[in-house]
Image: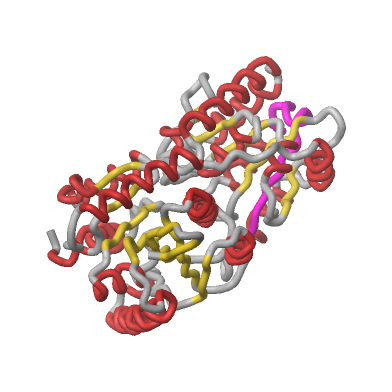
């Protein structure tokens, strides 16, 4: 436990896979800031590198360290890869001993499936381990089965970010049922972007006066649906229905995947959409993006484990069009707080865009209901409440037992 001003706070060691500021990174930031503000638990965060998340945590007064995390990649599922991973796990145990420096840790919280360092240290030091799962892995088959097994043998508690994520885990490891709970991601209460900041972002997109700005924000990734949105824009152009819209695709590729940006740019050029589609690099503050957006799209072609960008758009009062699968079904209720479209269907996406573009009353109603849903169901306060209860339950449950393989 840590002591501050005479108050004893129980330490929670967080291990996370990256130092960027995308979905799971923001979830971690909001959670530990909420815990820190309440004072019952003291977050100690381990990241593999410096980056925007490290800086944001440090600025918020969160204790954060750079150390080994034993990150799991598909390449490790070979004899040589597994040997290297074992070495990384041993390094993580040594690093966390240094980070913890003899302090008592109540719970180790591994944020995403991709990190094994937290599980290794928790097993070695007999500390309760919580695995916070943000992923659904469908292929290759070996990997899709290996991760749920790791969660079963390596956790005292597993928290899924959506009902679909939990369903995927339990389909492979039904014995996790008694240790499993769903906690939705949440957003902190923040002031909306200023009109000036929103207008400045709109200026970056090249949208013309009178056009509605359509925004897809997030990592440039083949399954996030940027290519599908471009196809939908081409359908609208062929129908003579695109002139009312301008599309902004916001975000960057992961390191080593820069070729995807070139592929998307070529797709836009080939379709003759260079005047209608703008690519904007990653932005630190997403609020001006949603302040400028007239329509938000989340057209993922594979099931989203959750869909953080959808609740961010709702918080920014942008009406949402989302693919009707995955964790997005926990967030968007068709015709109530957004529109759902058939996944991987460019024509359905084009139809929804055209409908919203020509129905201002519907845009206004969906935006208002989306904001209400975000505040009621996807707030940082409710997420922190839920995790504090889980941590308390783990502390009261006795010794860590996940290594028994049950």
Can residue 222 be spotted in the picture?
Answer: no
Q: Nearer the viewer, residue 32 or 83?
A: 32
Residue at the outermost right position? 209
250 magenta-colored: yes
The part of the image, by quadrant, that contains residue 113 is: bottom left
The spot of residue 372 in percent (x, y) is 55, 25
Question: What residue sits 72% from the left and 51% below the top?
Answer: 279
Residue 187 appears anywhere in the view: yes
Residue at image point 46% right, 43% down: 185
Q: Is residue 205 above or below residue 265?
A: above
Q: Residue at x 68, y 17 (%)?
A: 359
Q: Residue at x 67, y 15 (%)?
A: 361
Q: Is residue 341 left or right of residue 124?
A: right
**Res. 275 image quadrant:** top right
- Locate residue 148 relative to residue 58 in the image: left or right: left
**Which portion, as a residue range, is magenta?**
236-252
Residue 337 lies, in percent from the top left, at 53, 24
Q: Quadrant of residue 188?
A: top right
In the picture provided, is 311 more to the left or to the right than 161?
right
Q: Point out residue 341 in the picture as x, y percentages from the top left corner.
A: 50, 29
Residue reaching furthest to the top: 361
Q: Nearer the viewer, residue 302 or 148?
A: 148
Q: Quadrant of the N terminus?
A: bottom left
Q: How is the image coloured?
A: secondary structure
Q: Magenta span has 161?
A: no
Quarter of the rendering occupied by the C terminus = bottom left
The front one of 190 and 243 is 190
Q: Is residue 320 above or below residue 5?
A: above
* Rendered location of residue 97, percent (x, y): 37, 79
């Amino acid at each position: 436990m840590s002591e501050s001003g005479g108050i004893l706070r129980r330490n929670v060691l967080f291990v996370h896979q990256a130092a960027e500021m995308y979905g799971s990174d923001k979830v971690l930031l909001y959670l530990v800031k909420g815990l820190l503000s309440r004072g019952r638990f003291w977050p100690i965060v381990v990241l593999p590198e410096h980056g925007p998340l490290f800086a944001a945590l440090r600025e918020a007064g969160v204790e954060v360290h750079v150390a080994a995390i034993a990150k799991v990649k598909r390449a490790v599922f070979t004899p040589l890869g597994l040997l290297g991973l074992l070495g990384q796990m041993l390094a993580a145990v040594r690093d966390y001993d240094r980070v913890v420096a003899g302090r008592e840790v109540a719970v180790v919280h591994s944020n995403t499936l991709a990190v094994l360092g937290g599980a290794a240290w928790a097993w070695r030091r007999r500390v309760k381990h919580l695995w916070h799962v943000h992923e659904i892995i469908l292929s290759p088959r070996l990997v899709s089965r290996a991760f749920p097994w790791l969660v079963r043998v390596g956790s005292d508690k597993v928290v899924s970010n959506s009902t679909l994520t939990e369903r995927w885990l339990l389909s492979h490891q039904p014995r996790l049922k008694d240790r499993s709970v769903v906690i939705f991601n949440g957003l902190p209460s923040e002031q909306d972007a200023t009109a000036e900041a929103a207008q400045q972002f709109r200026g970056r997109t090249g949208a013309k006066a009178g056009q509605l700005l359509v925004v897809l924000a997030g990592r440039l990734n083949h399954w996030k649906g940027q290519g599908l949105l471009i196809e939908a824009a081409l359908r609208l152009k062929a129908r003579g229905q695109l002139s009312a819209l301008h599309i902004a695709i916001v975000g960057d590729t992961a390191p080593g995947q820069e070729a995807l940006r070139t592929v998307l740019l070529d797709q836009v050029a080939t379709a003759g959409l260079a005047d209608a589609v703008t690519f904007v690099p990653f932005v630190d503050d997403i609020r001006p993006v949603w302040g400028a957006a007239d329509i938000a799209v989340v057209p993922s072609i594979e099931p989203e484990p959750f869909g953080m960008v959808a609740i961010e758009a709702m918080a920014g009062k942008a009406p949402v069009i989302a693919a009707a699968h995955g964790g997005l079904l926990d967030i968007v209720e068709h015709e109530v707080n957004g529109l759902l479209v058939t996944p991987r269907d460019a024509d359905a996406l084009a139809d929804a865009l055209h409908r919203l573009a020509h129905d201002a009353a519907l845009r206004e109603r969906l935006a208002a209901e989306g904001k209400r849903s975000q505040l009621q169901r996807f707030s940082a306060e409710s997420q922190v409440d839920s995790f504090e209860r889980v941590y308390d339950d783990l502390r009261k449950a006795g010794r860590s037992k996940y290594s028994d393989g049950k």
